Image (cartoon, rainbow, N blue to C red):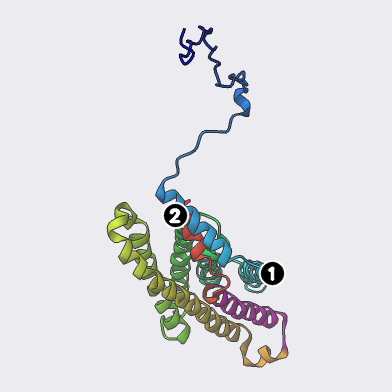
Amino acid sequence: MDSNSVSPMPDMAPMAEFDKTPPTPPEDTLPMDDLPPPPTTVTVQEEKEKEAHRHYEEENEWGCGSWLEYALVMVLACILLLASLGLTLYWVIRHQEGFAWRDDPKRQFNLHPVLMVAGFITFSGFSVLLYRICRCCRRIYVKLLHTVFHALAIPCVAVGFLAVLDSHNLALPPIPNFYSLHSWIGLVTMGLFAIQFVVGFFSFLILLCCEGATAGFRASLVPIHASFGLTTFMLAIAACLTGLTEKVFFSLGKDEYPKWPEQALIVNALAMVLVALGILVSYAVRSPTLRGDAKVCVTERL
């Protein structure tokens, strides 16, 4: 045998192939209650509304001083609105012999101051303040309440106007109509009140049937309607003040009035209540702190 030849290697058993893949651990079964909830789909409109609401809350959050101012103005205004009607009733029942109809023209006249104060001051005042009192209500509900309070004022004003006409015409001798400053201011107030009601009812309730097409028109009419509404309320206060002065001079005379009788004190107190209402209501409507327009607009969409 050749010494340089290489003998073949003996046959060896094949190497076992080991599976290097790690063993699969047993799957842990989780109860369905521990699984996270499925993701919710949020529309773009809902996200914008939530963002607008968050932005308003961050920018317009009230502090203790703002809430105190709001509560003081609103509570005091509501008390004075009711006090004006209460003082008028007390004055008429105690010092003007109560009420009657056409069988007693003198006592029929007493319906005039009570109903005019109820319609032009109490009901109209609450109607104006509703946009400040109902800050968190949907705007459509505030509009309906606003309309209801104005609608309640209409029969009061109509019957009060008829009562004064009858008391003048049925008196012996008859009393002339529409000669005083009080009557002229009252006529202007009634005219503005009627125009305000018709325009407001048509534009802010009827036109909601085609809301998209009339949105721009209604938005441009809002400041005009608000300004004339406040003007009508101030004219009503002026008419009441001139009417009270006229009536107390006719009842007491220039000799008795300076002696401070009880009737004079009641009438003067009622006049001061009306003046205070003019200040408070105008402040509540015009104050930027008490305005709730932005918040109402946001909550209307939510």
Can see residue 141? no
Residue tagged by mark 1? 68
Q: Position of residue 227 (x, y in %)?
A: 43, 76
Q: Which residue is located at x 44 percent, y 82 percent?
A: 185
| Side of 256 relative to 32 (left or right) | right
Q: Amino acid at mark 2?
A: Lys
Q: Position of residue 93 (x, y in %)?
A: 65, 68
Q: Which residue is located at x 55 percent, y 21 percent?
A: 20
Q: Quadrant of residue 106?
A: bottom right
Residue tagged by mark 2? 48
Find the distance from the CA under tag 1 to the CA under tag 2: 32 Å
Of all residues, the one furthest to the left in this rendering is: 213
Q: Pointer 1: residues within 10 angstroms few (<14), some, or many (20+)?
A: few
Q: Which tag, 1 or 2, sits closer to the chain's start?
A: 2
Q: Position of residue 66 (x, y in %)?
A: 65, 70
Q: Amino acid at mark 1?
A: Leu
Closer mark to the observer between disc 1 and disc 2: 2
Q: Quadrant of residue 253?
A: bottom right
Asked if disc 1 and disc 2 are in contact, CB closer than 8 Å, the reply is no
Q: Which residue is located at x 47 percent, y 79 percent?
A: 235
Task: Please name whichever residue, 27 or 248, is drawn nearer the observer in this view of the structure.
Answer: 27
Task: Please name whichever residue, 98 or 103, is drawn nearer the observer in this view of the structure.
Answer: 98
**Residue 193: in magenta span:** no
Q: Position of residue 249 (x, y in %)?
A: 59, 86
**Residue 267: in magenta span:** yes
SS category of the residue bearing label 1? helix
Can see residue 162? yes
- Say above or below: 214 vs 2: below
Which region of the structure is painted magenta?
A: 260-284
